Amino acid sequence: MKKVGIVGLGNMGEAIARALIAAGADRKDIIAYDIKPERMKAVVEGLKIASAKDPADVAARGDYIILAVKPQDAKAAIAGVAAGLDESRVLISIMAGTTTSSIASMLDKPAKIVRVMPNIAVAVCEGALGMTANYMLSHDELDGVARLLAPLGRVVEVPEEQMDAVTALGASGPAFFLAFLEAMVDGGVRMGLPRDKAHLLALQAVKGTVALLEKERTHPALMRERVTSPGGTTAAGLLVLDEKGFRGTVVRALEAAQARAKELSR
């Protein structure tokens, strides 16, 4: 495996390092840096990975350099890695709302740039990741990035203009699902179930449904029809969701998240 540099050891940066190690990466091939010395010391010593003295050192030693910093820290982080960056290395950004062209404009040299939008589930290697790249990467190089990221979850390549939709669906999506799950648990409690048992049943219902969908590779609508008996309990509940505009509300929530992502990009 090639060497991977990580600039930024927040929750996402640490999760990426952990996933790479779990996938079999040699710990000494992961080089990390964080602006907070105490945070870097804790993660580097905890994971037994290599440390760097600054972002330029990360870029000089890594084949892939992952920018896992907040968007407001983009300029400083990019300026830091620029000194150690050359055209043989691939710069991978997971910064929200920061396009490949924006990153390129902050560099003083041409660079291979990949933008990735992960979500919180990379922490358990089940993330949904959208990926796009600038013109400097070949097809094989982009495949190499996809293979690098594969331990984090499922990687979907999209054009740059679709990354805001990826942000809404993949990155914000877990929060919308969690709100729905919370409502299911509250509903169970309202019907008389103890909260711990309502939580267990709701979570398992969703977990089992997703597992079945993946196993059978079927469309959600087809499976929904299978569990909706004529005149039954499921049909009664679905009628209420339809009357309250459930589908439209979900779509509008995604569109609102996409619109906000576009604002951040600007």
Image (tube, rainbow, N blue to C red):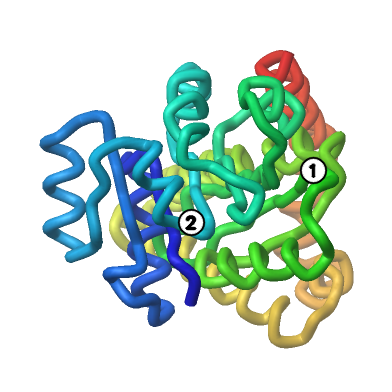
Q: Nearer the viewer, mark 1 or mark 2?
A: 1
Which residue is at 15% across, 34% downward? 37
Q: Identify the residue at horizontal 85%, vertical 45% (top origin).
A: 135
**Residue at image coords 78%, 54%:** 137
Q: Is residue 247 above or below residue 50?
A: above
Give the residue at x 39% y 41%: 7
Point out which mark residue 121 bears.
2
What's under tag 2, amino acid-wise?
A: Ala
Q: Amino acid at mark 1?
A: Asn
Q: Which of the 4 image quadrants contains residue 139?
A: bottom right
Q: Is residue 87 left or right of residue 243?
A: left
Marks counted in the figure total 2
Upstream in sequence: badge 1 or badge 2: 2
Residue 86: give x, y in percent of width and height: 59, 45
Mark 1 lies on a secondary structure that is loop
Q: Quadrant location of the C terminus? A: top right
**Does the image show residue 224?**
yes
Label 1: few (<14), some or many (≥20) within 10 Å? some
Q: Is residue 206 visible?
A: no
44 in relation to 125, above or below: above
> Which residue is the extreme one toward the bottom?
215
Q: Which residue is mark 1?
A: 134
Q: Which mark is residue 15?
A: none
* Residue 34 left/right relative to 75: left
> Which percent across, then down, holds residue 13?
38, 47
Q: Is residue 102 above or below residue 134?
A: above
Seen from the viewer's position, the closer of residues 183 and 63 is 63
Q: Nearer the viewer, residue 131 or 107?
A: 107
Image location (x, y in percent) of residue 184: 52, 49
